[in-house]
Image (cartoon, rainbow, N blue to C red):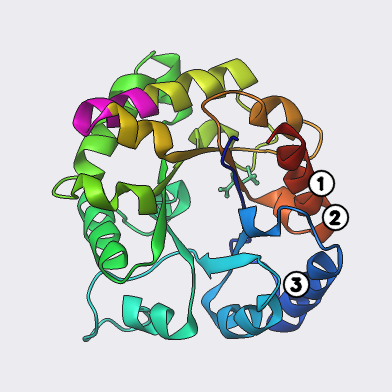
Amino acid sequence: MKKFLIAGNWKMHKTTAEAVSFAEEIAAMKLPNAEDVAVLAPFTQLAELGKAFAGTGIKFGAQNVHFEPSGAFTGEISVPMLKEIGVDYCIVGHSERREYFGETDKTVNLKLKALLEADIKPILCVGESLEVREGKGEQTFVASQLVADFEGIPAALLPNVVIAYEPIWAIGTGKTATPDQAEEMCAFIRGVMGGMYDNKTADEMLILYGGSMKPSNAPELLSKPDINGGLIGGASLKAADLAAIALSANEIK
Ligand code: PEP
């Protein structure tokens, strides 16, 4: 049976009241694969989302974290703070954080280590810009991200890491990578992880595609052998759309 994770990245959308109403709507649908669904929400919504999803199987998490456990880092949120709320996942290295907030492979690596130590599952985002793809450098670029991001992380912790391949040119643009392009890179990522660790570990990892996934294109993307789900921005804001994508995954399972 193929393993899936259908993860919604809400970015900077929704008030807490709106988040709770989304949670109630999707919980009421009683998705058969609710445990394969997650919502990554703004910090202020997490405590209420945790309560709203309790007992539903649906997972939740944050979109960023600081790698230090505490300290003089005004405006930041630490791993122990997330742990206290009980989050399942945390996105690390989203291209928007790399581009607008100075995230580097070094900080990504420190965040991965801090989350894994606390038993929170990181969803690590990697992916190339349009310029890199046009220069046919996407595989070299993504491989270099993986090598730097996983430095010093032991194989035993890999089952807790999700990788999301998110080509920057396909995020929020309405431009989706073709299913073949997405599959090619997800398979490549699995191969790189196999080389860095071992094939068995790599075969069991969840590798997602992200970039304008929606109910209409999800079935074809999700049916590709190396794509274990999606990290979904825009289309995750409506419960009906996230649920439709989750149901597509359930049919393929
Ligand atoms: C994302 O933010 O991770 C993303 C993939 O966004 P969208 O689905 O809107 O392209």
Is 158 a magenta residue? Answer: no
User: In which quadrant is the C terminus drawn?
Assistant: top right
Image spot of residue 163 (x, y percent): 42, 43
User: In which quadrant is the N terminus drawn?
Assistant: top right
Using the image as rendered, state which of residue 175 and residue 160 is in the foreground. 160
Above or below residue 48? Residue 38 is above
Residue where numbered disc 1 is placed: 244
- Magenta segment: 190-198
The numbered mark at residue 46 is: none
SS for callout 1: helix
Name the quadrant containing residue 211.
Answer: top right
Above or below residue 115? Residue 1 is above
Other residues around mark 1 within 10 Å, as few (<14) / some (14–19) / many (≥20): some
C-alpha separation, residue under disc 1 versus residue under disc 2: 6 Å
Dot 3 amino acid type? Ala
Residue where numbered disc 3 is placed: 23
Residue where numbered disc 2 is placed: 240
Q: Going by the image, does 49 lie left or right of 142?
A: right
Q: Going by the image, does 160 lie left or right of 177?
A: left
**Is there CB contact under 8 Å for labels 1 and 2?**
yes
Instruction: Mark yes or no: residue 41 visible.
Output: yes
SS for callout 2: helix
Q: Quick one: label 2 or label 3, which is nearer the N terminus?
A: 3
Dot 2 amino acid type? Ala
Dot 1 amino acid type? Ala
Residue at 21% over, 36% down: 147
